[in-house]
Every structure is written in C-alpha cells, then in structure tokens.
C-alpha cells in the first residue's frame, strides 16, 4: 500500500510529536520520522483521535524542527523477521542484528504486539524442566509452560543465576529445547557478560539473545520483551520447540512504562506507575503456556529487582498475582557466601505438584520436598529461640535442627555457578540431610518412606 507522508508537526514534547488529525492513522502504526538532515528515525503512533495524532520517536526528538520534520506513516505495526536461522543470533531491543551477521533472510514477518494465549486453547502445564540447581529442582520445581519469576535485589547475583539457568536448563527426553534471553535496560558490562558467558558455556546454537542497553531509547525497553516473546512463540508453535524465555530486568521495563506514562500526561496510580501496569504485565506473562493443538511450549522466567527489597512494591506485587509462584533471593544468605541465595520459605512454585513424582522426576520427590520445607521452617523457629536462651540451653532435638539448618544451607542450597546437579543427585542429598534429624521430627513422611530412604549411620564406638 502507498505510504502517507506529512511535512510539519504541531508540537514536540519530550519523545513525542503531536500532529493534527491524520486520516487513516492507526494505534501502534509504525512511522518514519524524517528530519531536515535526512537521517530517518523510527517511531510509532501511541494516541489517535479525530483531531490529533501523537507519535512516539524511538531514538528521541533531539535536533528535530517542527516546521521541517516529515512523518511518513507506514501502515503496519512493529514487526520482526522470523526464520529457523534466528537461533544462535544476537539482536538489539528492536530486533535489529547486533552480531554483525546481517539481517534475517527469508521466513516470515510477524507483528510483535502478540496477545495472551486463549485459556480455552491451553493445555495444563506439566513436565519437569531441569535447571541443574538443587534448590529449584527439588523445592521450587519449574514446569514446562509455567511462568515463574525471580524476585531479586540490587547487588544480588541474579545475572549469574540467569546465565546458569539459561545454560543448564533442559527438558528431559526432549532435544528440541531452546532458550530466548532478553536483557532489558541492562548495563554495558552486564550485556558483555551475558554474551560472553552464554556463548562460552555451549548454549549458542540453541540460544537467541535480545539485548537492550541502559542508554538505549526508553521505548526500546517497552519493545524488547515483545520481540523476545514473538520469537519464542514462533520457535514453539511454528517449529514445535520447547522454549524457555528469561527476561531481566522487568523492573527496568516497568520504570520505562512509568516514564512514558508521565510524558503522555496520564494520571498516575500507585507509586506513580500507570493504572494499567497490571494488564500490561499480564499481556507479557500470559504469553507463556502450552497449546492443546501445538507441539511446542513457552516457559517464562522473568527476573525483577525489588526496589528497596520491598516485596510489596507494585512491580513484584502485581507480578506475583499474575504468575504461578516466585523465587525470592536473600540478601542475608548472599552475605554469608551462599550461592544461589534462594530464600526457600517465602518462595513457591504453584504448579510443582503437577510435574514431579512418578513419571516426571522420582516417586520420592513430593514427600522429600514437603519434609525439607517443614524441617527448614522449624530451623528458623529454633534459631530464634536459641538467640534468646543460647544454643546450650535448647533440647537435643533442637540442636539436631540447628545442625540440619547449617548443613542444608551450606551443602544443599550452596553450589557453584558452574555446578550442574542432576535431579537424582539433588534428591539423594536431601535424604542425606534428613538423616541428621531424629525420626519423630520427620512428620511429613510415612514410616515406609523413612525406612526406605533414610539411612542412619551407626555411631562410632
């Protein structure tokens, strides 16, 4: 279709251009902004009515002159080129190659706006995804088709954990497994770390990388997760692959959304974020799942840093409402040198029960996980008591709980960033730890399970 071009804009404000009503202009339509120097900038329509059209310029409006600036309406949404050759490539936040290998040739072009999966078209998520990390695989199990966020804080090793999950994750029995990694508003050194580590650890051929840097235009941060998810949906539902999407840092995405909302003059809601923050996040998170008629699946791990470590902040709060659990990182564990510093008790995987046990991991997994949770919960109670009366004054069973807690944190939770533990190894470690406790404390296990899996070492003479 022929392009429509207009010369002159009414007003320039921040990243926005205001034009008089443009016949036929559509919401989210892509435009070329052409200044007098001829260097084309890309933008999109963000508001439209009978009298006016508001265009958001991706790379900013610096140097634009209202009277001489031309706007060309392209009649299409923001799109990405898709083909099987995507795997192994690195792109910027707008889907443009940043690996020097040129554009994606052939294949198809598809709008990145996408839409959440129709609930009636969904298959219930099942099947265990192994991350090679004991705390996640045994206690916070990731299920194919799930959306399971990581709640972190500034300075915590979530980037290191993201790389470990991306390089170690696998769907047992499936070779067509891929990872789409999206960095949103990340620093240059973090981008270099992601690119080098993900490539060095052998995942390159099954990895697709989108990197939006902190000094890139704000609008790119809004687009980056959508480009990543559109590519993941193509790999999953067109090519039949099982795709894990890791997005970090979703806090940068939400901050960009707030910044653009303020620039548009919208009425702010809680802590200055737009009132539609919940529905906007849901439009991203609900693109995970398994289709009844599809061969593939999309699993999501969004990572966000909680401002001031506040889990009630709008970003983690709303994310928790939409997703199926959360993995919380602990500043206290990290200060004690434990990696990954996963805080077990406030963490949760709501779909875990449907993807573990016989036929998925091992028949003893559900009982072991329940007992480890219960025993570690008691550890915190005993530590509080010991802090008041002293460790020497607590009972023998309480001392056993303290010993269990220390061993649990330093051997089970703690593992190297290069260490990849098979699920069987992690489960066996859990049973060894429970052997430190007296049998009456194992209230979540049957006598049959205790006799079968817990091997008591006879005391030395």
Image: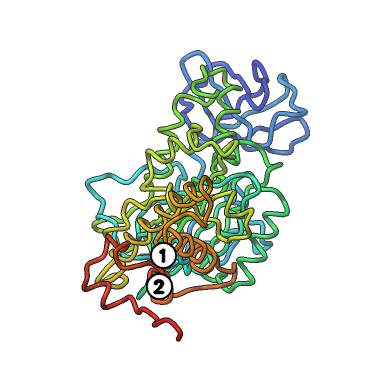
Query: From mark 2 to mark 1, how far is it between C-alphas?
Result: 7 Å
Q: Which mark is residue 137?
A: 1
Question: What percent of the width, then of the height, locates residue 194?
Answer: 64, 60
Badge 2: residue crowd in 10 Å (few <14, some 14–19, many ≥20): some
- Colour option used: rainbow
Q: Give the residue at mark 2.
A: 423
Q: Residue at x 47, y 18 (%)?
A: 49
115 up-or-down from 298: above or below: above
Residue for point 60% across, 47% down? 93
Query: In the image shown, does 84 or 427 lie closer to the viewer?
Result: 427
Q: Position of residue 285 (x, y in %)?
A: 41, 45
Please tell me which residue lies in front, 402 or 445.
Answer: 402
Q: Is residue 161 visible?
A: yes
Residue furthest bottom in the image: 461
Residues at circles 2 and 1 in contact by the CB criterion of under 8 Å: yes
Residue at position x 68%, y 60% in the image: 193
325 to 409, vertically: above or below:
above
């Amino acid at each position: 279709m022929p392009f429509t071009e207009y010369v002159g804009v009414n007003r320039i404000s921040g990243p926005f251009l205001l034009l008089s009503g443009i016949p036929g202009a559509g919401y989210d339509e892509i435009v070329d902004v052409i200044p007098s120097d001829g260097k084309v900038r890309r933008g999109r329509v963000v508001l439209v009515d009978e009298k006016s059209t508001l265009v958001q310029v991706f790379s900013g409006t610096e140097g634009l002159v209202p009277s001489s600036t031309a706007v060309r309406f392209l009649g299409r949404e923001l799109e990405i080129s898709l083909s099987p050759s995507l795997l192994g490539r690195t792109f910027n936040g707008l889907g443009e190659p940043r690996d020097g290998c040129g554009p994606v040739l052939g294949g198809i072009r598809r709008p990145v706006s996408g839409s959440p999966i129709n609930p009636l078209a969904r298959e219930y998520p099942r099947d265990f995804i192994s991350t090679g990390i004991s705390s996640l695989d045994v206690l916070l199990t990731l299920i194919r088709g799930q959306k399971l966020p990581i709640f972190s804080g500034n300075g915590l090793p979530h980037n290191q954990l993201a790389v470990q999950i991306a390089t170690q994750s696998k769907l047992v029995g499936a070779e067509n497994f891929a990872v789409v990694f999206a960095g949103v508003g990340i620093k240059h050194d973090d981008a270099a770390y992601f690119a080098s580590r993900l490539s060095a650890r052998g995942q390159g051929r099954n990895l697709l990388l989108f990197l939006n840097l902190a000094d890139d235009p704000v609008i790119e941060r809004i687009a980056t997760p959508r480009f990543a998810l559109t590519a993941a949906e193509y790999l999953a539902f067109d090519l039949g692959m099982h795709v894990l999407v890791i997005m970090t840092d979703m806090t940068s995405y939400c901050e960009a959304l707030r910044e653009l909302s303020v620039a548009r003059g919208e009425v702010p809601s809680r802590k200055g974020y737009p009132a539609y923050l919940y529905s906007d996040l849901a439009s991203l998170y609900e693109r995970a799942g398994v289709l009844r008629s599809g061969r593939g699946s999309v699993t999501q791990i969004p990572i966000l840093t909680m401002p001031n470590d506040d889990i009630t902040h709008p970003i983690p709060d709303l994310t928790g409402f939409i997703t199926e659990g959360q993995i919380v990182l602990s500043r206290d564990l990290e200060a004690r040198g434990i990696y990954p510093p996963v805080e077990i008790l406030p963490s949760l995987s709501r779909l875990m029960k449907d993807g573990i046990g016989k036929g998925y991991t091992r028949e003893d997994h559900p009982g072991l996980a329940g007992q480890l949770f219960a025993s570690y919960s008691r550890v915190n109670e005993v530590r509080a008591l010991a802090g008041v009366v002293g460790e020497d004054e607590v009972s023998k069973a309480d001392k056993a709980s303290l010993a269990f807690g220390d061993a649990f944190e330093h051997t089970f939770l703690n593992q190297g960033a290069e260490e990849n533990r098979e699920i069987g190894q992690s489960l066996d470690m859990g049973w060894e730890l429970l052997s430190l406790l007296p049998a009456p404390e194992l209230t979540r296990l049957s006598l049959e399970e205790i006799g079968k899996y817990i091997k008591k070492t006879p005391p030395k003479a």
